[in-house]
Each structure stands twice: as structure tokens, then as C-alpha cells.
Image (cartoon, rainbow, N blue to C red):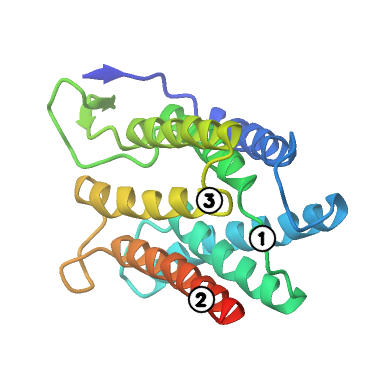
Amino acid sequence: MIAVPHIPSFYPLFVIVGVLLGYLASTAGRIASPLHSTARLHFTVVVVSAGMFGAYAVPWVASVLNYDREGGRSLLAGVLVAWCVAEILKGHLGIKGSTGDGYAIGLPLAAGIGRAGCLFGHCCLGIPSDSSWALEHDGQGYAPIALAEIVFHAAFFAISLGLTSCGYLPGQRLRIYVVGYGVFRFVSEWWRPHPRTIGCLSLYQWVAILLAIEVLWTIYRETIKIHQSSA
């Protein structure tokens, strides 16, 4: 098993550092955005606030309804709520272009650093495991969920940097990351201790499905608008 020091104070520190570095990475360079700098800051504050609310509110509601008694917070639920709020804001403000390319760099960076806090905080533990790659906590081994998430977000951070530097897939980079994270979470839920209380799936597998549907619906709506404008 892999022994990781238990330092609970690292969690809030890593989260704060991750959010700050993520925002700086999102706004650095010459990443195209339909919003000027001040409007982009306001937009980011509202969307991030909505995401933080969703990250805490959805698990709380799940614990109240006895779908998942752990409560706590969920990055996946936060991303879903933030995405929905961003789309509502864009519609209300009449923003037609993509606002997500910068966040395709900042979000995986922030999430990966935050998961490092989970790793040292010994939270987000997977199911018990006695394999050599299990993380040790109080003498018990657990599936290394936090470590797997760090690797996932770090990989997408590198991919987003590469796509941005080459100018590939403008307007689609954040969508690729979000859908990818939804797929990752759906699969990795089988190694998490969340109960399968809704059908044969856990609450967060359903959240992952809803997130993928929301992103694909956004792509579909934009495709229809492009065809209508060119007709």
C-alpha cells in the first residue's frame, strides 16, 4: 500500500491556491473571449460562486433524502450547477461566443490542486482495497480515487495547454474536458463507496449523465443556430 501523510490543514490551503492559480491560468495569455476583462471577472465570480453552492448543496440534499449520508461536497455537482448557470447567464446577456476556452486550462488546474488537498486530507477515499496501489489510512487500504483524479486533471491541463498553443478546437476545449470528466466520474464511481440507491447507479453517476447531456445539448443548440444562420 502507498502511505500518504495525513495533514488535514492542507485541504483548505490547496483549495485556495488551486482557485487562485486556476483563475490566473484562465485569464492569462491571449485566449479569445467575447467578454472584456471586467465583465469576464464578474462572469467568473458568479459562475464559480454557483459552482461552490452546487458542490455543497447537492450532497447536502442527497444526505437529507438518504441517497448518500456522507454529505460533504462534490466537484462533479459543482461543475453541473456552474455549467447551467453559465448557459443561463449567456442567454440573458446575449453572449453568443464561447466563454470556456480559458476555463479549460484553469478548471483542471484548480481541480487537480484541490484533489491534492483531498489526498493529504485522506478524504474522498475509495472502496477498501488490499492491492499494492491502495492508499493507506489508519492501517486500511483504499482505492486511490484522489490520486486518480489528480492524474486525470493534470492530463487534461496538459491537453488544454497543447490545444490552446496550437489553436486547435477553439470553443470546444472546455466541453471536451467537462464531458471527459463526466465519463471519468461515471466509471470511477464503481470504486467509490457511494450507495447505488437510484436504479443500479449512484447519485453521482446520474449527475455525471446529466452533465454530459447538458454539454451535448449546448453543442446541439449551437449547431442548429449555425445551420439556421447559414441557410
Q: Position of residue 155 (x, y in %)?
A: 42, 31
Q: Which mark is residue 174?
A: 3
Amino acid carrying label 2: it is Arg
The amino acid sitting under disc 1 is Val
User: Mark 1 = which residue?
Assistant: 47
> Which residue type does callout 3 highlight?
Leu
Front residue of 231/188: it is 231
Question: Mark 3 falls on what kind of element?
Answer: helix
Task: Report x, y in % for residue 72.
Answer: 46, 54
- Residue denoted by label 2: 221
Q: At 63% across and 63% down in the image, what residue appears?
A: 50
Q: Secondary structure at mark 2?
A: helix
Discs 2, 1 touching: Cβ within 8 Å: no
Image quadrant in which you'd find residue 66: bottom left
* Vertical relation: 50 (above or below) 177: below
From the viewer's perspective, is the residue at label 3 or at label 1 nearer?
A: 3
Q: Quadrant of residue 17?
A: top right
**Looking at the picture, how far across and down is residue 162, in whole percent?**
52, 31
Residue name at image x 68 percent, y 70 percent:
90
